[in-house]
Amino acid sequence: MSSPTMAALIAAMLLASGCAGDGTSQSVTGNRPPSSAAIAASQTEISSAPAVATESTESTVIQQPPARVLLVGDSTLLAVERYRVLSAFRGFDYIYSAESCRTLGVPSCGDPPLPPNALQAILAADGTFDIVVVMAGYDEWWTSFPNSFDLVVDASRSKGAERIIWLTYREGVGYVGPDGATANEAFVRNNQTLRDKTSSGQFPDVVLADWYSYSAPTTKWLSEDGIHLTKVGARAVADYISRMIAFVQGLPCPMPWVAGGPIDQVCQNPDLHGPVADIKSLYPS
């Protein structure tokens, strides 16, 4: 074999082995297909490699619109407006309707023209609602209360409400009604009616919010008659209602329990937690 032929043969062998004359590794590119052994080796490597998650589209978090809430109250809830602390209602859209001397299903008390009772206020409210909150009935006698309860619940359901949050009545108080009668007996009996109704199984959509027990340990939330609210009490009841709405919806609390503290990402039942210790620190203005 001549020297040029031998040199060409050696060069071809070096090119096929992928090694440069200086001993360093070189990438070989071109149209030559890989050998069957190389294919098998690369398939084994791919199958043994850990899976890598790829994102083909951006994940979208769908946020539910805030609940539409109808707040129906008598002079006890009216304090929230009178003290100008409506901003303490947080975490939902609302229609607020509170009237002094408002009853539930019977004609309201007071001088003519009488304010619409709770039943009339619910039926007259524009649109539909996810939740109806009732803080009225302090001027409803216990004999008419059971039927009025049914009427208010039916009206709330007719407006689309999936939950009806009903605040219990303060007990052990000296409040005297417009007719001069001591009303504490009615409050005790009406609370018992609420418990009987909600435990009957016929009203699974009614949530009993125990405002009576929640507010019992406080001394500065209530006026001397035991039912009407001071300015700090008006903030407290708005905060309480807001937390109760968040609880029934499984949403974060609208405010922390203490100023600067963490916010519950799933708001616990305020009746189980107990009252906010310092409501002024949460709502200073």
Image (cartoon, grey):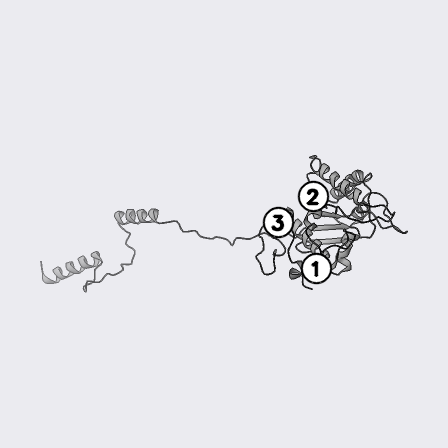
Which residue: 76% across, 50% down? 72
| Position of the N terminus by quadrant | bottom left
Please, what is the three-letter code of the amino acid marked with disc 1?
Answer: Ser
User: Of helix, strand and loop, which one carries label 3?
Assistant: helix
Quick one: label 1, few (<14), some, or many (20+) residues within 10 Å? few
3D distance between C-alphas at marks 3 and 1: 23 Å
Q: Position of residue 24 (x, y in %)?
A: 22, 63
Q: Is residue 264 above or below residue 7?
A: above
Which residue: 78% across, 59% down? 82
Depth order, front residue of 64/249? 249
| Image-based side of 28 in relation to 164, left or right | left
| Mark nearer the N terminus (3 vs 2) | 2
Quick one: label 2, few (<14), some, or many (20+) residues within 10 Å? some
Tell which tag, 2 or 1, sits nearer the viewer. 2
Label 2 sits on residue: 208
Depth order, front residue of 120/183? 183
Depth order, front residue of 2/69? 69
Which residue: 69% across, 58% down? 88
User: Of helix, strand and loop, which one carries label 1?
Assistant: helix
| Position of the C terminus by quadrant | bottom right
